[in-house]
Image (tube, helix red, strand yellow):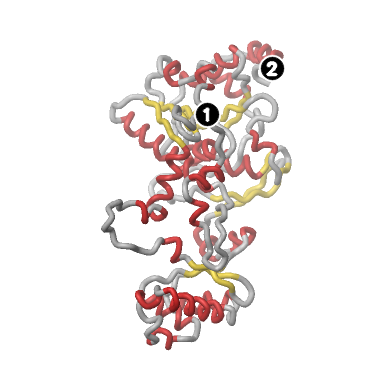
Amino acid sequence: MAPLKNIKVVDFTQVVAGPVAGMLLAELGADVIKVEYPGIGDITRTSGFSKGGLNSSVLNCNRGKRSIQIDLKEKEGQEIALKLIENADVVIQSMRPGKITKLGLDYETVRTLNPDLIYVSLSGYGQDGPYADRAVYDPVLQAMCGYVSLQINPQIPFPDLMRTALIDKAVSWEMALSITAALFARERGTGGQELEIAMIDVAIAFLWPDGGMAETLLDSDVTTGTHLSKLMNMTETANGHVVYFAIADHQIKGLYTSLGHPEWFTDNRFSTREARHTDNNNEILGGLIADAFRTFSTAEIAERLHSNSVPCGEVIEISKIAEIPQVIHNKTFFEWDHPRSGKIRSPRHSTVFTETKLPILDSAPLLNEHSDEILSEIGVGEEKRRLLQEKGIVP
């Protein structure tokens, strides 16, 4: 039985952070009802890469859910939402602070209906404070929280973004972790509770284990060190690029050997960490290494580095990831045929449970696909459903 079987989640979120959190819960067996708004529904339904009523964004963030559209601005729509919440285990919402209260769906209101509810309020900066009313997106937090300042290749000293929604996805995993922890605490007698998650807090916490190295020990007599970001190397080969990571002496020796210059390890300028990190020697060594890399193809130098125990990886296009032998071996992806959208590739849940069978989520819901089914489950009869549809409360 899946770990979260019989756990019901009502998901009022859209775009990436909240929806992916809901999908992670669905991958663990939860019944996740995605509440979408009148019209286009989740804004990601308008993005490209689409066929047959689904697109890649919806598939990658909402597999395994059921969809219903509800006009939450209308009283009857709010009543439907309350009926869903009344029998739910978890609610996740990401509306601007204060907006959910105006709809009568805030935690203080719904806890009277469902005291055992785990209620998650996701915000950009927090439920209150000087930035609480600001709109926020992933790249904004990358800039504010130090990520951009670290994305500097020494060879091209200009900061850049991580061109993926890194923080959104970190928030997703934090939400799923905190929800499962709260459910476990509830089983131990804690009861329901609200979880307040601010994206800025997650962004900083996610960065800090390595990105905050230089800002952790605050006394004036702390010894200096090298920031981890400066030890990461990407270099050009004869036909592409490779990333390698060599810090320990045996790795440095392996690097020199791989490049055909084992003698560098006996050169006083390059044989010790202290010598390598003097400005002049570092510059000389950097040039020698760069020149040597360009004499090898990517495949050849990667093989040489691996054979000398130097961690490295070829820079691979996203379209080729599914062809990586280890990815094939791990069965990271599964492919399936959708009756309207054709052949689809999706990654499985990352963790392999040895004693627990997880569901394979082979589809995401079409917009409003499960409206009748969900309304019937909360006791809304056929005649009432027809009236709600005529009013546009539930399309």
Bin the neighbour count of mark 1 within 10 Å (Cα to Cα): few under 14, some 14-19, many 20 and up. Answer: some
Q: Amino acid at mark 2?
A: Gly
Q: Amino acid at mark 1?
A: Asp
Kindly tell me whether residue 370 is visible in this rendering: yes
Q: Residue at x 50, y 54 (%)?
A: 149
Viewer-side residue, 342 vs 59: 59
Side of 226 relative to 105 (left or right): left
Where residue 313 sits in the image (x, y, percent)? Answer: 52, 68
Q: Is residue 25 above or below residue 106?
A: below
Q: Is residue 112 above or below residue 146?
A: above
Side of 227 relative to 35 (left or right): left
Bin the neighbour count of mark 2 within 10 Å (Cα to Cα): few under 14, some 14-19, many 20 and up. Answer: some
Viewer-side residue, 136 vs 8: 136
Q: Residue at x 43, y 74 (%)?
A: 279
Q: Residue at x 45, y 81 (%)?
A: 256
Is label 1 in a helix, a strand or a loop?
Answer: loop
Is label 2 in a helix, a strand or a loop?
Answer: loop
Which one is in front in this view, the residue at disc 2 or the one at disc 1? 1
Determine which of the numbered discs, if any, sits on residue 133 in the image.
1
Where residue 286 sits in the image (x, y, percent)? Answer: 49, 76
Determine which of the numbered discs, if any, sits on residue 392 in the image.
2
Where residue 332 sits in the image (x, y, percent)? Answer: 53, 55
Q: Quadrant of residue 110?
A: top left
Where residue 199 sits in the image (x, y, percent)? Answer: 47, 38
Q: Residue at x 40, y 14 (%)?
A: 112
Circle nearer the N terminus (2, 1): 1
Q: CA distance from mark 2 to mark 1?
A: 30 Å
